[in-house]
Amino acid sequence: MSAVAASAPARRSRRSPWWRWWPLAIVALFVVAAVFAPLLAPYDPNFQNLIARLKPPGTVSRGYQYWLGSDELGRDLLSRIIYGSRVSLLVAFASVILSGVVGTTLGMIAGYRRGWVEIVVMRIVDVFLSIPAVLLAIITVAVLGPSLVNVIMVLALTRWPRYARVAYSQTLSIATMPYVRLATLMGASSLRVLFRHILPNIIGAVSVVATLEFGLMVLFEAGLSFLGLGVQPPTASWGAMLSTGRNYVATAWWVATLPGFCLFVLVLAVNLTGDAVRDRLDPRFR
């Protein structure tokens, strides 16, 4: 009796307490800033005021208040950071959704159909996973050309095998369940079995992968923009701002430091949110 009583608090303590979800509030704050960027940004992110080049935070020049300073062309850094969050979040959301849909669907099909379908799909997954994702992304973007759409397509192309692996392993265990076999014997189509009986039972594991992949997509987009293979100027991008700001670190630290800090905070908040989602959905912690 005492052992049972002692184990109950231990199980409850493993659940994610409400205060562990504060990173989600930070992510939501970045999302709100990206969606309402035209309303929140004090100035046009591409407006140049050459007289106010590389001014420190808090500077007032020609009637313009630069709360976070200005860059090498006199553009307001706060406005560019707010608009830059649009690019990072748009690329992350789009690539995660696209890669998640493709990878989950192929993984479920491979785990349910088995046979030659399983062999073909999983060998393709092994080939993609054997190539470094960053290298594959750089090569593909260099061939297709840098643009927002190409960055999204490339990131989805390089990351879908992660979802396929998880969906495949989860489907293998669920496909042998009695209710799945019963649905098959009653004449349910493969499409209905996959999306009516299997998908709802693996969506938790896939969601955990998606939350963790979201932070990686933000980093990959920033890395490609830093190398000049992402979103092209004058569109504001945190990676491009870091690339430009590294030339002025000694004289204008804010140009590179502030976008880098925003990138750090967003990725950290997303990763902590992913940990909380994992703890919440993991049946061992229930």
Image: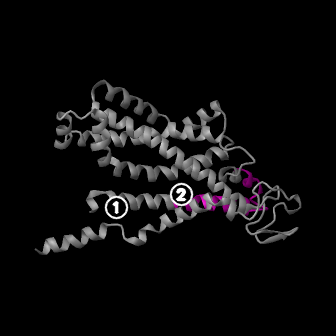
Task: Looking at the image, tell me whether mark 2 or mark 1 is earlier in sequence order.
Answer: 2
Determine whether the residue tagged by mark 1 lies in a helix, strand or loop: helix
Q: Amino acid at mark 1?
A: Arg
Main SS class of the magenta portion in the image? helix
For the record, the magenta segment spans: 243-268
Looking at the rendered image, the quarter that the N terminus falls into is: bottom left
Residue annotated with mark 2: 267
Disc number at residue 205? none
Question: Does residue 125 appear left or right of residue 37 in this picture?
Answer: left
Question: Does residue 161 appear left or right of residue 192 in this picture?
Answer: right
Is residue 132 visible in the rendered structure shown here?
no
Q: Amino acid at mark 2?
A: Val
Name the residue: 81% across, 65% down.
55
Determine whether the residue tagged by mark 2 lies in a helix, strand or loop: helix
The image quadrant that residue 11 belongs to is: bottom left
Any magenta on residue 256? Answer: yes
Q: Position of residue 101 (x, y in %)?
A: 43, 41
Q: Position of residue 276 (x, y in %)?
A: 40, 62
Q: Residues within 10 Å of mark 2 (few under 14, many from 20)?
A: many
Return the residue found at the far top: 116
Distance from disc 2 to disc 1, alpha carbons, whole Å, reads 20 Å
Instruction: Judge by depth and name the residue closer to the eye, 83 or 283.
Output: 83
Name the residue: 56% across, 37% down.
154
Instruction: Judge by depth and name the residue closer to the eye, 237 or 223.
Output: 237
Name the residue: 66% across, 59% down.
37
Q: Is residue 285 above or below residue 87?
A: below
Residue annotated with mark 1: 280
